[in-house]
Image (spheres, helix red, strand yellow):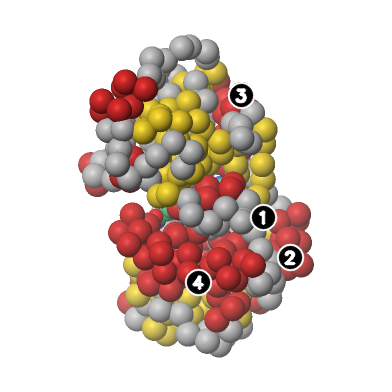
């Protein structure tokens, strides 16, 4: 079990010591699974996701309808890939592979398995169902195609571009015929964006003193679509660089999750002046598109049109460091924790 210890104060970055790895025997018997319509699973891969920071404290009222705070002393709930060992639910049987919300532990009893997706396609790496073919993949697909109204030939900027969501948004945009630039926090990631993921250009925002200047250099004519994964000063720098009738898709604001006070925004007037449409979205509203998403993306993976970079650590005991690393940009690609490979 990986146990979340105590609520972290706002304004603090999570640390490994906020989590504890302990051993205990849980009574997850066949009778429990069958009697409760729950599903007993063996966890295989766990996903480290930025939203998990927001669960490490009191959630604002607006977030409580779709995520819950972690309970100190209890195993961390999170996305993962698991194998069904026993099922009391008619939709699942022993041996099925599923992805969805499970626990950061070796075995879990999933009490609401109807929220999990059954994995039908196993001719791709199973770990992909924590990223490319799981929640982050759906986020990239819905956020880009359903929210951003992209068109061939447009200019697209993506922040946290080398991460789980960003790398896919960039590839979708390239496949559509857009000009695509990404920002990321290291030279290694910039290299990845330009040389493996097919971005037209990329820059390391940590090395740039003047974000406005670098955006002007990359987009002399302005930005049609900004896919925002970070918020804060990057968003503020993007605003004056938007084109008339540009779209800003607010996917996430990871730069703000561990701050006591959100950073100030100074350029909001540009939304008005440039008639920009700025829209937030949550992936949960788009899961009905999952079959369509798979139909689109699976062939693209098999034809090599879409590639995916994962950062895989072995062992549940290394989970806390991997999760914390996401908030420092230590992950290169989708951060996955392997609990068991079989
Ligand atoms: P990533 O795999 O991209 O990992 C997070 C990355 O964010 C880090 O690697 C780091 O990359 C970057 N980062 C961390 N801290 C900062 C900071 N202070 N300033 C700028 N960048 C930072 O995560 P995901 O792809 O899974 O998620 C990307 C975003 O999408 C997040 O904001 C997340 O909350 C959001 N999201 C939203 C969903 C929705 O439904 N709307 C669903 C899923 C995700 P770097 O080295 O480049 O700094």
Marks 1/2: CA distance? 9 Å
Marks 4/3: CA distance? 36 Å
Q: Mark 1 points at which residue?
A: 309
Q: Nearer the viewer, mark 4 or mark 3?
A: 4
- Residue 282 in view in this figure: no
Point out the residue furthest to the top here: 24
Instruction: Give the quadrant of the C terminus.
Output: top right
Q: What element carries label 1?
A: loop
Image-based side of 300 in relation to 233, left or right: right
Label 4 crowd bin: few (<14), some (14–19), many (20+), radius 10 Å: few
Q: State yes or no: discs 4 and 3 in contact (Cβ < 8 Å).
A: no
Q: What element carries label 4?
A: helix
Q: Name the residue under label 4.
A: 296
**Which x, y percent locates residue 133?**
52, 56
**Which x, y percent locates residue 282?**
35, 57
In terms of sequence position, does the residue under pointer 1 or pointer 2 come before the other? 2
Q: Residue at x 52, y 14 (%)?
A: 22
Give whichever of 36, 257 is nearer the camera.
36
Q: Name the residue under label 2.
A: 196
């Amino acid at each position: 079990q990986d146990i979340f210890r105590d609520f972290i104060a706002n304004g603090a970055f999570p640390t490994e010591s906020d989590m504890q790895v302990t051993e205990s025997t849980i009574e997850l018997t066949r009778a429990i699974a069958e009697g409760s319509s729950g599903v007993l699973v063996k966890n295989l891969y766990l996903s480290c996701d930025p939203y998990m920071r927001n669960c490490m404290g009191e959630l604002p009222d607006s977030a409580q309808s779709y995520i819950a705070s972690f309970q100190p002393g209890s195993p961390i709930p999170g996305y993962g890939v698991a194998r069904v060992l026993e099922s009391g639910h008619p939709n699942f049987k022993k041996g099925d592979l599923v992805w969805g919300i499970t626990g950061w532990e070796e075995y879990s009893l999933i009490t609401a398995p109807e929220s999990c997706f059954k994995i039908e396609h196993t001719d791709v790496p199973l770990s992909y169902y924590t990223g490319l073919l799981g929640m982050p993949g759906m986020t990239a697909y819905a956020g880009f195609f359903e929210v951003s109204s992209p068109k061939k030939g447009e200019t697209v900027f993506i922040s946290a571009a080398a991460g789980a969501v960003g790398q896919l948004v960039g590839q979708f945009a390239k496949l559509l015929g857009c000009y695509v630039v990404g920002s990321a926090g290291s030279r290694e990631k910039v290299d990845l964006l330009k040389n493996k993921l097919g971005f037209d250009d990329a820059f390391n925002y940590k090395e740039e003193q003047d974000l406005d200047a670098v955006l002007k250099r990359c987009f002399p004519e302005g930005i049609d679509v900004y896919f925002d994964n970070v918020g804060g000063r990057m968003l503020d720098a993007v605003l004056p660089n938007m084109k008339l009738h540009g779209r800003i898709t607010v996917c996430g604001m990871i730069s703000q999750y561990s701050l006591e006070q959100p950073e100030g925004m100074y350029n909001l007037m540009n939304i008005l002046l440039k008639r920009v449409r700025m829209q937030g979205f949550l992936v949960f509203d788009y899961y009905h598109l999952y079959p369509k998403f798979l139909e689109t993306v699976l062939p693209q993976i098999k034809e090599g049109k879409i590639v995916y970079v994962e950062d895989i650590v072995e062992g549940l005991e290394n989970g806390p460091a991997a999760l914390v690393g996401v908030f420092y940009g230590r992950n290169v690609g989708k951060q996955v924790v392997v609990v068991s490979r079989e």
